[in-house]
Image (tube, grey):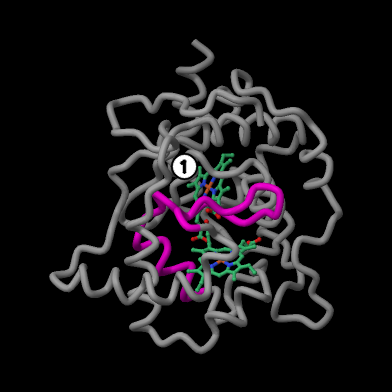
Amino acid sequence: MKRLQLIVLSTAALTAATLAFAGPPAPKKAGIEGKGYTWNAQEGEKMEALKKTGRIAEGQEAYEVCGACHLPSGAGRPDGTFPQLAGQHTTVLIKQMADIRAGLRDNPTMYPFAMSMIDPQELADASAYMQSLCIPTDHGVYEGKDAAAQVAAGKALYDKQCVECHGKNGEGDKAKFYPVIAGQHYKYLLRQMTEIRDGHRRNANPDMVKVIKPYTNDQLVAISAYQSSLKMPGAMCKPKGKAAPAKGKKG
Ligand code: HEC
Ligand code: HEC
């Protein structure tokens, strides 16, 4: 019953947020565009949530409202509007949520929902649940006729400039807050690459920005094509209805 109410609530809230959200707008915190920006400053509610032990079962319930956009499987959408969250590191999920709430990463569509998850324990639980989901293999990839050439060009760049942080298979680094990118949608990746290069993703990592600053639009296409081709052995699953937990560990 509670489940049903939540689904009804989230659909109604989603419509409201999409049409006209009447609540207070997101705050704006100085990010990478400002002087004195420190990436991943060790402060705020992020630190509270990171200290909690995430509980997967409780997290499933907390995540329900998020599934309206990110889907119950955490797969997001191949059109790139909503990112894939399944299998993402808890550290990354908690940091991104805290940044969105603090106005350090602009996300007006999601902001009202981010504001509904204010309890650090709830955030830790939802993050543990998302991390426990296997990464569906049917995500959006680059589909042009020149896909093989794009992926090859992207691989050359990736091996030189990205692998040290995001890993050979796109597995990121949990302890360092480096995101998993395997299984992410091509169109979302391309949008993030562009926003990070152009300084619009304000919570970006300055060392990464240095790397992609000189990239042309064509290079961003190639690197995104390659990233969406990455596979993480053991963490991915064929989609069949509800996603099954891949790791089953506590976050
Ligand atoms: C109304 C739709 C919507 C809802 C509901 C929603 N999100 Fe999102 N979320 C988005 C959008 C859109 C983005 C990507 C924004 C961008 O492109 O920067 C996003 C991005 C994220 C990210 C960043 C992912 C990454 O790879 O960096 C996280 C984490 C996230 N959402 C978690 C949640 C959680 C947890 C909830 C539930 C409390 C939630 N979202 C509810 C729309 C939504
Ligand atoms: C110095 C380490 C480092 C390097 C080098 C680096 N990145 Fe990143 N990358 C990060 C960090 C940290 C984040 C998350 C930033 C934040 O906190 O929002 C990130 C974010 C991203 C994202 C957004 C993921 C999401 O879920 O929204 C993508 C995509 C990405 N990097 C791809 C790349 C590619 C491609 C390269 C090489 C051209 C690269 N990165 C180089 C550290 C790095």
The secondary structure making up most of the magenta span is loop
Count of all numbered marks drawn on residues in the image: 1
Identity of the residue furthest to the left in this view: 145
Q: Residue at x 71, y 49 (%)?
A: 175
Amino acid type, label 1: Leu
Q: Looking at mark 1, is its residue's CB closer than 8 Å to ligand 1?
A: yes
Along the line of sight, the residue nearer the viewer: 223 or 98? 223
Using the rendered view, name the quadrant where residue 116 is placed. Answer: top right
- Badge 1: residue crowd in 10 Å (few <14, some 14–19, many ≥20): many
**Could you tell me residue 233's position as x and y percent?**
41, 41
Residue 235 image position (x, y, % from top left): 44, 37
Q: As displayed, is residue 55 above or below residue 172? A: above
Q: Residue at x 84, y 56 (%)?
A: 42
Quadrant location of the C terminus in the rendered image: top right
Q: Which residues are magenta?
A: 168-195
Residue 34, given in percent of the width and then of the height, sits at 76, 81
Instruction: Say above or below: 204 vs 185.
Output: below
Q: Judge by depth and name the residue closer to the eye, 214 or 130.
A: 214
| Left or right for 55, reference 51 | left
Left or right of 230 on screen, residue 163: right
- Verify whether residue 189 appears in magenta: yes
Magenta-colored stretch includes residue 193: yes
Residue located at (51% from left, 89% from top): 214
How far across and how far down the image is residue 144, in percent? 18, 69
Identify whether 23 is placed above or below 245.
Answer: below
Which residue is label 1 attached to?
14
Residue occupying image coordinates x 62% and y 82%: 210
Q: Element under label 1?
A: helix
Residue 63 lies, with reference to residue 114, above or below; the image says above
